[in-house]
Image (tube, helix red, strand yellow):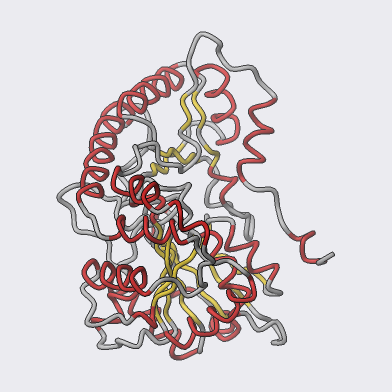
Amino acid sequence: MNPDLKLLQPYPFEKLNQLKAAVTPNPELEHIALSIGEPKHPAPDLVQQALVNNIGRIENYPTTKGMPELNQAMADWATQRFDLNALTTEQVLPVNGTREAIFAFTQTVVDRSQARPLVVSPNPFYQIYEGAAYLAGAQPHFLPCLEEHGFIPDFSSVAEDVWRDCQLLFLCSPGNPTGAVLSLQQLQQLIELADKFDFIVASDECYSEIYIDGQAAPIGLLEACARLGRDDYRRCVVFHSLSKRSNLPGLRSGFIAGDADILKAFLLYRTYHGCAMPLQTQLASIAAWGDEHHVQENRSQYTQKFRAVLEILQPVMDVKQSDASFYLWAKTPIDDETFAQRLFAEQHVTVLPGSYLSRTIDGVNPGANRVRMALVASVDECVEAAQRIRQFISTL
């Protein structure tokens, strides 16, 4: 058995289930879950129809590289969305959702034979960054995302020896759970650091299409490369997914794009890993990437929910509009675990304690006394949940 498995910590939702199991929720209230980032908006009709129309393709083996039509659809979408000068089909590769891809990518690029291989990531973070690092033989190194820095790591304070040993830097922009978005200047500074110290920058951008109507769309890592005139995207890759953009978490469809040399090695790994996307999923994905109408409608619903929920909560709670994503990263008047447990017991609303998404480094847990609220339910349910949270806070 791989001895590194013992380094893995329980997933946040395992901890949450244990926390909730210790109490009995109010039976007079229907449960509202704001804990899991699983979109509840309907899946687009054109995607469902594409699956039905192509269900017969289950008779055929798919290739790991994907259909040329899918690679072109992904390249076309990214080129238009991020105003790229060029993105060839050799610079994109389909993946079965970003979680699978991020894990596998880490196994591909980490060189465990080095003295101190580091995988650097934000803190709080999507837990797959940590698990992938350990199982690749690397050590995670966490950078706190604090309010005084806009919930973005203070990259200027990172010691040079960390950058020297860094093999892979994970970014998450828009961030999970904070919703913070990296600026063009920050991204370009990180590209310069990657050139200087020879590490890979991997940007998890699966929330890039969820932002407030009328605001500028979040910038991406490849866009920052393009503005530097770097169309080879050297040392840079991004991950995108249809889960959040198109309300298709069960389709398990996304892509990785960027440095063609890195993707060539990743394709080799994936060929042995055996993770080709089914053909009917590829054809449904082409339909999704080619349509923006459902994405705009999706964004409008999230905009409506943010405005309604914040109007209810801001008078009683320290919570601000996030830059993007569908999360609120709210301060709690009592410790986050107690807040989440009592809220579940008294109001039958589930939120995720922020400390479950973070690690305590040098005595500081950046998620302590915060909770993540995922506004994924319907508008009416989100409003009802906000009213219950406000009622709960009034009893504290």
Q: Determine whether 31 is above or below 202 in the image.
A: above
Report the side of 267 relative to 285 (left or right): right
Q: Position of residue 22 (x, y in %)?
A: 70, 24
Residue drawn where x is 44% and y is 22% of the image: 393
Q: Position of residue 365 (x, y in %)?
A: 58, 51
Q: Position of residue 374 (x, y in %)?
A: 42, 39
In this view, the residue in front, 55 or 27, is 55
Which residue is situated farthest in the top direction here?
28
In the picture, which quadrant includes the N terminus? bottom right
Residue drawn where x is 45% and y is 49% of the image: 177
Residue drawn where x is 55% and y is 71% of the image: 120
Which residue is situated farthest in the left direction here?
214
Report the side of 264 relative to 294 (left or right): right
Q: Write down the quadrant of residue 150 in the picture.
A: bottom left
Q: Determine whether 96 is above or below 108 in the image.
A: above
Residue drawn where x is 40% and y is 41% of the image: 39
Q: Write down the quadrant of residue 283 in the picture.
A: bottom left
Report the side of 165 relative to 66 (left or right): right
Q: Determine whether 122 is above or below 226 in the image.
A: above
Q: Position of residue 158 (x, y in %)?
A: 51, 75
